[in-house]
Amino acid sequence: EKSFMRAMELHRQAHSALGEGYDVRRLGELQMRQDELAKAEKSLACAVRLDREAHDRIGEANVLQTLVELQIRRDKLDDAVKLLVQVIELHRQAHSVLGEANGLQTLGDLQTERGQLNEAERSFLHSLECYKQFHSSLGQGNGHESLGKLFLRQLRFDEAREHLQNALR
């Protein structure tokens, strides 16, 4: 923790909001690992502010993604979903197709967990299209697997079989 604090101070002296934001984000992640969730939330909120000041949409999206994980750990799924919508939009604005796809995949997982199966299907289908656009075989496999599991849950066996077979390719 002391190393992060020193790095933040050096970046602050150099007037590097990007560097300071990165350091504060890493500090927040460390605090999360140590189950200091209130401290982590404050650090991550500071990192979001610094990334906004630096106009770093990808950095801001990454910090918000970490806040999503924090909210999931606290079992605050509504808050996690709201943050994910912001993450997806920031990636869209930055033309980060892979970031958008990953955000949509996580959103679909949360929607599935919350029983919002139609919304989850739309999120998974949209993420699959993004993964195809990015030419991510792994992402496409994960997308097909998620859709297959979702369709199994809905007793849509033919669609489930198709997606699960596609996941294996």
Image (cartoon, rainbow, N blue to C red):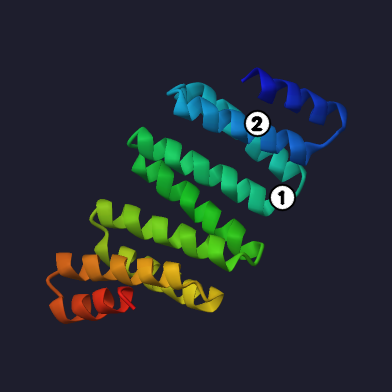
Which residue is painted at 40% across and 55% down in the image? Answer: 106
Q: Is residue 34 left or right of residue 158?
A: right
Where is mark 1, residue-wise? 56
- Residue 24: mark: 2
Question: Type of residue at label 2?
Answer: Val
Q: Dot 1 lies on which element?
A: loop
In which quarter of the view is residue 24 placed? top right
Residue that lies at the very extreme toward the front in this rendered image: 169
Which residue is painted at 74% across and 33% down in the image? Answer: 20
Which residue is painted at 37% across and 70% down in the image? Answer: 141
Residue 12: percent from the left, percent from the top? Answer: 81, 28
Residue 50: percent from the left, percent from the top? Answer: 71, 37
Question: Type of residue at label 1?
Answer: Asp
Which residue is painted at 57% across and 68% down in the image? Answer: 97
Q: How many marks?
A: 2
Quadrant of the drawing holding the N terminus: top right
